[in-house]
């Protein structure tokens, strides 16, 4: 039961980051490497603010805002300076490493010395329960706002840009501006996730963003394998399930005694499996159909 509740609590917070990655990955068809810099950015700015006595809710919002600014930088580099999306993410992520160090003043910033967080504000006496409650509330707000926004004229325009840029431009939509907005919302959510993770873990660390993109993509792919042909809002909900399943898999692997040093390798291999599963399934069905046709012809 402890593994389940722990996976749910962690999965809820990770799913905020996965939803942020989903926006660029599926709407813009970009695997934005900025995520690995904006995630610790949210943690760094929130930790710095909390240590200096800022209200936890305000400090958490700072995390989102600074993440959105990181997305703005990536968006401008990609759309205005015409730098390829992959290189854009790498450049911003690299620059954010130094920015995060400047913000924290050191590689690791602790929040354990009587620092108030959003989780202590609404404490029930059980840290896992606190994480689940706060995570669920934040997710409900995030998903509600995203569904509302992406059903407005501007939100539909952003989705149209992702579907067909030429057609969107022909209809008078400014592709560059729409991309920048998606970049900002995406990285704002990723940083928000980093902010909450720092508060629940009790520290912000310069290296906590390593592998976040892989984790997010794994949650997204798991969600898409489980259920297909869903509405935008329903897809966001399934990403939460995907993130929780992902955390359960990781918890199970650790419970089996796998060396924690091998986790990054396991992350990568698991993502390869999930990404190739649709192709493997398709090939299996094709081979099965051929065999059935061969049997019919023999009969």
Image (tube, rainbow, N blue to C red):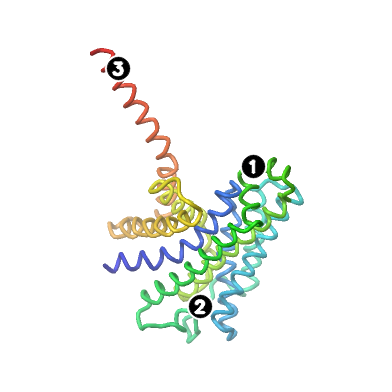
Disc nearer the start of the sequence (2/1)? 2
> What x and y, as percent, mark residue 1?
26, 67
Q: Earlier in the sequence, mark 2 or mark 3?
A: 2
Residue shown at 55% from the left, 68% from the top: 192
* Residue closest to the eye, 248 or 261: 248
Q: Looking at this view, name the residue that lies furthest to the left.
A: 299
Q: Nearer the viewer, mark 2 or mark 3?
A: 3
For label 1, the residue is 164
State left or right for residue 31 relative to residue 262.
right
Left or right: 183, with 5 as reference point: right
User: In the rendered image, which quarter is residue 128 located in?
Assistant: bottom left
What is the number of the mark on residue 110?
2
Classify mark 1: helix, strand or loop.
Answer: loop
| Structural distance between the alpha carbons of marks 3 and 1 | 41 Å
Q: CA distance from mark 2 to mark 3?
A: 66 Å
Is 297 above or below relative to 253?
above
Residue contact between numbered discs 2 and 1, judged by CB atoms under 8 Å: no
The quadrant in which the C terminus is found is top left
**Mark 1 surroundings within 10 Å by alpha-carbon count, few (fewer than 14), some (14 through 19), many (20 or more):** few
Which residue corresponds to mark 3? Answer: 294
Nearer to the camera, 235 or 134: 235
Label pair 3/1, CB-CB below 8 angstroms: no
Count of picture labels: 3
Instruction: Report crowding for label 2: few under 14, some 14 to 19, many 20 or more residues within 10 A (C-alpha).
Output: some
């Amino acid at each position: 039961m402890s593994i389940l509740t722990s996976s749910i609590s962690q999965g809820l917070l990770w799913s905020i980051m996965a939803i942020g990655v989903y926006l660029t990955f599926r709407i813009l068809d970009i695997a934005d490497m900025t995520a690995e810099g904006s995630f610790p950015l949210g943690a760094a700015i929130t930790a710095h603010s909390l240590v200096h006595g800022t209200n936890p809710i305000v400090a958490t919002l700072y995390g989102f805002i600074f993440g959105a600014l990181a997305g703005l930088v990536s968006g401008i580099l990609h759309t205005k300076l015409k730098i390829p999306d992959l290189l854009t993410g790498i450049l911003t992520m690299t620059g954010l490493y130094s920015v995060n160090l400047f913000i924290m003043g050191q590689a690791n910033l602790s929040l354990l010395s009587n620092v108030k967080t959003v989780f202590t504000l609404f404490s029930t006496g059980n840290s896992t329960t606190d994480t689940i409650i706060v995570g669920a509330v934040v997710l409900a707000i995030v998903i509600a706002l995203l569904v509302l926004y992406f059903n407005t004229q501007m939100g539909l325009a952003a989705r149209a840009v992702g579907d067909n840029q030429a057609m969107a431009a022909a209809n008078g939509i400014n592709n560059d501006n729409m991309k920048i907005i998606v970049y900002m919302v995406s990285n704002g959510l990723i940083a928000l996730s980093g902010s909450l993770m720092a508060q629940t873990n009790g520290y912000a660390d310069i290296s906590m963003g390593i592998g976040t993109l892989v984790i997010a993509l794994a949650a997204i792919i798991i969600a898409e394998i489980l259920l297909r042909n869903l509405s935008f809002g329903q897809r966001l909900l399934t990403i939460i399930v995907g993130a929780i399943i992902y955390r359960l898999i990781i918890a199970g692997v650790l419970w089996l005694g796998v060396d924690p040093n091998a986790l990054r390798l396991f992350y990568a291999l698991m993502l390869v499996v999930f990404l190739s599963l649709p192709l493997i399934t398709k090939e299996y069905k094709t081979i099965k159909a051929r065999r059935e046709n061969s049997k019919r012809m023999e009969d």
